[in-house]
Image: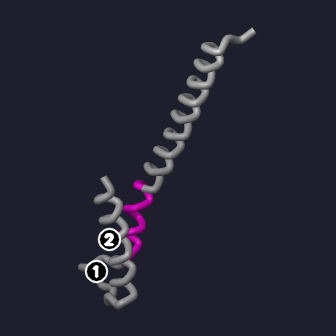
Amino acid sequence: MVTFTQATQNQKTTMKRNAESEYLAAYARAMKAWENLNPIIHDNPDPKGETQIKWGHVADMLRIAVELEEMSQEK
């Protein structure tokens, strides 16, 4: 027979393990997203390159900049 204390400890261990695994999964997602940022920025025309910059390019880069600024200010 499992006592109340044992059941509570088992539940805490399960919750902790679940929280740790969920955190690890979220961390991995964040790191993957971070790795994907550089190519996203560099897939756009280089400001010093030969591509003629158009307003669509400006909108794309502003969207990226705004989203990054919002994320960096959340802490």
- Separation of disc 2 and disc 1 at Cα? 19 Å
Check disc 1 and report its element: helix, strand or loop. Answer: loop
The residue under the point 71% across, 12% down is: 2
35 left or right, relative to 53 = right
Compared with 1, 56 (above or below) is below
Dominant SS of magenta comes to helix
Residue 16 x, y percent position in the rendering: 54, 29
Q: Which stretch did the figure color magenta?
A: 34-44
Q: Residue furthest front?
A: 4
Residue under label 1, please give it: 49
Residue 35 part of the magenta segment: yes
Residue under label 2, please give it: 65
Residue kind at label 2, given as amino acid type:
Ala
Mark in the foreground, 2 or 1: 2
The reply to whether callout 2 and callout 1 are in contact (CB within 8 Å) is: no
Check disc 2 and report its element: helix, strand or loop. Answer: helix
Front residue of 58 and 9 = 9
The residue under the point 33% across, 84% down is: 58
Residue kind at label 1, given as amino acid type:
Gly
